[in-house]
Amino acid sequence: MKERQEKHLIIGAGEVGQALFNVLKKHYYVVLRDKDGHKKEKFDVVHIAYPPSKNFVRITRRYNVLYRPRLIIVHSTVPVGTTRKLGRLAVHSPIRGTHTRGHHPGVMRGKKQPTGEQSQSYLGQSLKFFVKYFAGPKAPEAAQYFEKAGIATRVFKKPETTELLKILDTTYLGWNVVFAKEVKRMCDEKGLYFDEVYAIPNRDYNEGYRRFGMPHVIRPVLKAMPGKIGGHCVIQNCDLLDDWLTQIVKERNKKY
């Protein structure tokens, strides 16, 4: 007897949803729908790929009632504690990687933005290149679906772990972008070259510590782009965590 193909529903047809669809469709029966589009089917796994909102928990619980899945995988970046509110079936699995090749949209403001198709392609590649994290009691089960699709995974016990690490991941980028912008400001004020004060010495620093066998202390080397931090993750994710780290990134960004 032929084994029944498990059914996956991805809710959220944006860049993240499209990337998940393109990766999973080769291995499972997968349906992609927008948040407001209803499918009269039952699904084994529901993937949440829409951004956080005030009613995120209520909306997502409704899909649990509607589709009665065995598993809900939340790929969205959400405030710490959100996934646990969704119940025992929910697992958090943040998206890691980039929407664009060669730079991060939060850094390269003013550059030509990728098309939707290009962005989906980059996210799809990111899904394959980066270890996919899963957190919660049912995380091992969720991870297996992606392992079968050829994606490396890592499991954590508490969903709060990946919720926090995702926000801090983009905040760390924002922190470094702000630092680079402030160095550029000081260089301009003192008539100095940014590359000579920041880029060249940091690259030499990194090379020296690689030779020392200490790659764990290397530093990011960013370009100092004019204007506010762009993209749709760095500053927006700062709003999900009330802490002085996120507040500094947001406040400094208002001045650019």
Image (cartoon, rainbow, N blue to C red):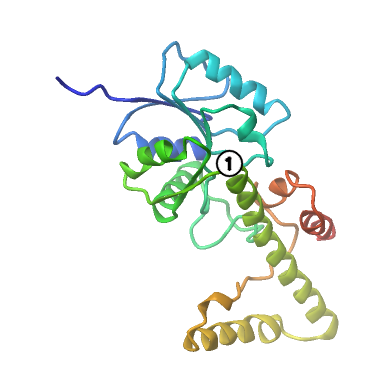
Measured from the top left, where is residue 177 in percent x and y?
69, 65
Q: Residue furthest left?
A: 1
- Is 9 placed left or right of 252 in the picture? left
Taking 156 as reference, is 214 above or below it?
below
To which quarter of the image does residue 168 belong?
bottom right
The tally of labels here is 1
Q: Residue furthest top?
A: 40
Q: Residue at position x 41%, y 20% from top?
A: 43
Q: Amino acid at mark 1?
A: Pro
- Residue 65 location (% of width, % of height): 54, 14
Q: Which residue is mark 1?
A: 159
The residue drawn where x is 52% and y is 85% is 207
| Residue depicted at 53% across the width and 44% down the height | 157
Residue sitting nearer the eye, 182 or 127: 127
Locate the C terminus and report the quarter of the image it occupies: bottom right
Is 41 positioned to the left or the right of 85 in the image? Answer: left
Q: Is residue 71 above or below residue 202?
A: above
- Indicate the quadrant containing the N terminus: top left, top right, bottom left or bottom right: top left
